[in-house]
Amino acid sequence: MQVPLANLWHWRTGADRSSAVGLGVRWKVLLGMAPRPARMASAQVGENKMKEVVLGLGHQSSLWNVVQIADDQLRSIHGSPKKMVVRADGLMVEAHRPHYEGQFDSFVLRLEGKRRFRKLDSLREIAAGQPAACDFVEEDGRVEIWLSPTDPENVEDVHRSCDALSAALDLPEVWRVHGEEYRNKPLSQELLFKAVAKYRSSDIHLYPGAPPMFRIDGRLQARGQFEPLSSEQIMRLIEQMAPEKHFEEFQRDLQCSFIFHQVGLGYARVSAFIKSGTPHCTLRILPEKIPSFEDLNIPRDAMEQLGNMHFGLILVTGMTGSGKSTTVASLVDWINQNKNVHILCIEQPVEFVHTNKQAVISQRDVGEDVGSFAEAVRGALRHDPDVIVIGEMRDPDTIRAAINAAATGHLVISTLHSGTSYETINRIVSFFDPVERDLVKLQLRDALKCVICQRLIPMKTGGRRVALEFMFNDTNLISDAILKGNSLAIKVGMQQTASRSFIFEKHLYELSKQEIISKEVAREFASESSILEQMLIGSYAIPSPDTMLDHH
């Protein structure tokens, strides 16, 4: 049936569209010399369009297959749109669906260029013989075909008709795809934080096309109360949470980090970044109440001994996500409760927020309050601190300044990425040029008081707890080994009865013996499984310094 083109476009955009709902699902094909659509640019916050994606699909015989493949690709990048535009080489397909999930049930096909009209008669003939209700319209050199199933449940009729019409078209191999009308309902920060408390999660990962992913007991998991997210929702969430300065940094540098406070529920260390042109975001959750030593299952007597020191360097080490910052915060909180001192914290960004108790605490945010860690540590000596807390020792200048501060009568507490406590010395030394390394080892021998290394391990009853290794610089054997940079000698010294130190294997053995963790977990997280196996069967003997050092 041929009807005026203007009437069909009036149905599509006008007030009487509601009267045509009974027509059911429609597939619309428009052929003509319409202007080529402008290429989509990357969307700004608040717009309902997202960056165009270029897909090489190879030879395809069906427009319906093209739409399906494009939809799969687009939802993995930006999320699920209600409207999708697929275009290539004089051809454009506009697909619509009533919801964010499910099949597209309405289409527009635009063609331009004379070669696209060579099979116009074939298109007209094919359209006339389809099982779906069909209106074919020609007016002023333009053609529009409307397809709708005779029964709204029979969307497959439209797809079969789409396949049939594709036979009269030469489909290109490369397509440009963009979506519109993505999910734009604001994502609730409160619900995210409440979900974290409910699932005992440590981190949240947000990326388009998937619901929020929660790290629970070390594993990323989705939870059913959240829908898949769109790029627009994530971008809007970042804009809402980030201070203006940091959001400008995100727009300029395509990444930023900051702290967000959900009052009554906790803090989040937010890291926002761009991947494949789309926003991604991770949130490391931090409690409002700083946990105690008992909360963290860290020996109180050892930590109080460290907190009572007046000078020297204390390092908390471990891999990313092992809880280093939490351990430091707990130690700082104990000092804050028990000593009348000035604690100067230098962090990027500030994570745990401390309030003055017995001590006076000054927390400085690198990038906000000072230019760099090294600059802040050097300047700290003029601020009359008793304790200097450095968020992370990440470069030679910061490490040098920290060691100098510890050597001049200040207690310095910091973190470092290191697999074991006895390897930490060589890890620090590796930051420096060879000509400086002997001097650095000499300074560490005199300034370093303790290295705590930790790993988060799964418990039998669920959840995770910390496995610990303490290296106290409290014997001549350990001090001499630090000066020589001899990691094996340090480990041997840590196991002697004269030292308060202990290695991972000893702590893992004790946790296994207490049935807190399984033997399999103990083996998995041991630094040297052979040592743990000997401990488990009762045959381990503490190595003699003479024999082990000679072997080294």
Image (tube, rainbow, N blue to C red):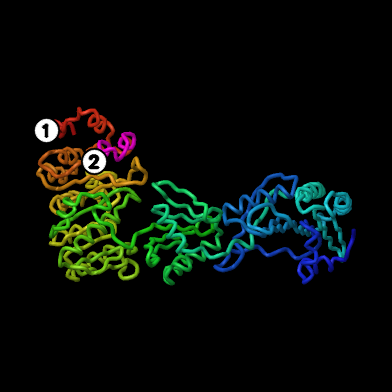
| Image vertical order of residue 297 relative to residue 272, above or below | above
Q: Is residue 457 magenta?
A: no
How crowded is the residue under tag 1: few (<14 C-alpha within 10 Å), some, or many (20+)? Answer: few
Q: Is residue 516 magenta?
A: yes
The amino acid marked with disc number 1 is Asp
Q: Is residue 198 left or right of residue 172?
A: left
How crowded is the residue under tag 2: few (<14 C-alpha within 10 Å), some, or many (20+)? Answer: some
The amino acid marked with disc number 2 is His
User: Which residue is painted at 78% across and 67% down in the image?
Assistant: 17
Find residue 428 and report its horizontal and vertical position in percent.
24, 50
Boundaries of the magenta span: 511-522
Q: Quadrant of the C terminus?
A: top left
Residue highlighted by disc 1: 546
Q: Secondary structure at mark 1?
A: helix
Residue highlighted by disc 2: 507
Q: Is residue 15 left or right of residue 377?
A: right
User: Which residue is painted at 41% across and 61% down in the image?
Assistant: 270
User: Which image quadrant for residue 540?
Assistant: top left
User: Which image quadrant for residue 20?
Assistant: bottom right
Q: Secondary structure at mark 2?
A: helix
The foreground one among 41 and 437 is 41
The foreground one among 274 and 464 is 464
